Image (spheres, rainbow, N blue to C red):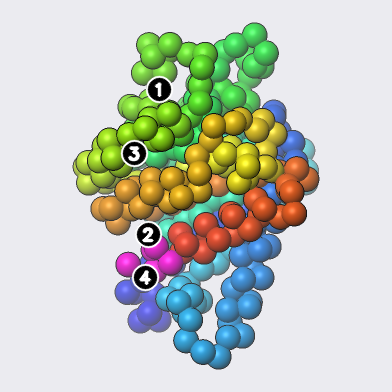
Amino acid sequence: MPQSKQKPHASVIVFPFDLFGGTGTGAGAELLGDALREMFDDNALEKRPIRCDAYKGLVTVKDVTFRTTKSLNLWKNTGRQAVKQALRAGERVIWLGGNHLSVLPVYEELGGDKAGSALVIQLDAHLDIYQLHDVMPNPACGNFLLHSDETLPQIVNVGHRDLFLHAKEFEATFAKTFSAVDVATDPERVTNDLIARVHKAKRVWIDIDVDVFDPAHLPAVHQPMSFGLHPLAVLRVLTAAWDAENVVGVSISEFDPGRDDRDTSLNLLGWLLEWVLLKWYEA
Ligand SMILES: [Mn+2]
């Protein structure tokens, strides 16, 4: 297939793991996977040239399921293999996770990259290294970065609203953090920093915990935290992340459709996924 030689394939990996916090977000991963399938079917019926023709036939949606105890026990291994396989094949990856913990296999795979220099641009309201009195000590969505089996990749958080941690606590995990206040007051500084980093990185992964958005625009989360990012601010950050065109993957987690309001969050994330695909395939 000559077409596939010019353009890499993309794998959408539906990974609805949602144990240890964020129960219900697994359904969000499945819903987004179904929404993409529906969109691809719809696009295929279109007779006129449309922008999505750019990735027609190049994107595959793959489902991982967790319906047995065995599959739950093996969750991290299964995830690691899935992302490893896709990246080694030179594919673009969209990881539709349940809770944020479900993205840990991706972090481990990128961190385990012996060539190094993988950069994760993480959009999240939280810095997931919490060891506070109400966070469980075993791996969970609020502390998963403390439970990696590998050296973590370089992580830059954008959009957090943390008011707990001292810098010395998160500097060990994060190469840099830009709070929502930084994004609001000095967006140029944030985007300039990201642009410099993506040009130095061998590959870039964008990890979106959807609670980075302000709950007014994305209500379907377990811990809605005010003062979040406006969707257009997120697009500005993502555009900077794409400056070097070496983005290999995007993950989305923590979307709980049971908490949505008139599909506001579903529509936002559906649009965003379509935009991501165009970003890759119209480049
Ligand atoms: Mn979060």
Are discs 2 and 1 less than 8 Å apart at CB?
no
- The residue mark sitting in front, 2 or 4, is 4
Q: Earlier in the sequence, mark 2 or mark 3?
A: 2
User: Which mark is first along the chain, 4 or 1?
Assistant: 1
Q: Quadrant location of residue 9?
A: bottom left
The residue where tag 4 is placed is 282
Say which residue label 3 marks. 187
Amino acid carrying label 3: it is: Pro
Residue 16 locus on image (x, y percent): 67, 46
Could you tell me how far apart the alpha carbons at marks 2 and 1 are, in whole angstroms? 28 Å
Is disc 4 surrounded by few (<14), some (14 to 19) or many (20+) residues within 10 Å? Answer: few
What is the magenta range? 278-283
Q: Which residue is mark 1?
A: 173
Residue bearing the label numbered 2? 90
- Mark 3 crowd level (few <14, some 14–19, many ≥20, 10 Å Cα): some
Tell me: is circle 1 under 8 Å from ligand 1.
Answer: no
Of residue 74 and residue 220, the one placed in the foreground of this image is 220
Q: Say whether residue 282 is magenta.
A: yes
**Does residue 210 show up magenta in the picture?**
no
Instruction: Name the spot of residue 172 as percent of width and height, x first.
Output: 37, 18
In primary-sequence order, the first of circles 1 and 3 is 1
Q: Label 2 amino acid?
A: Gly
Kind of residue indicated by mark 1: Thr
Amino acid type, callout 4:
Glu
Horizontal side of residue 128 vs 42, given as left or right: left
In this view, the residue in front, 276 or 21, is: 276
Residue projecting furthest to the bottom: 47
Vertical side of 276 occupied by 80: above or below: above
State the residue at coordinates (66%, 70%). 38
Is most of the magenta stretch helix, strand or loop? helix
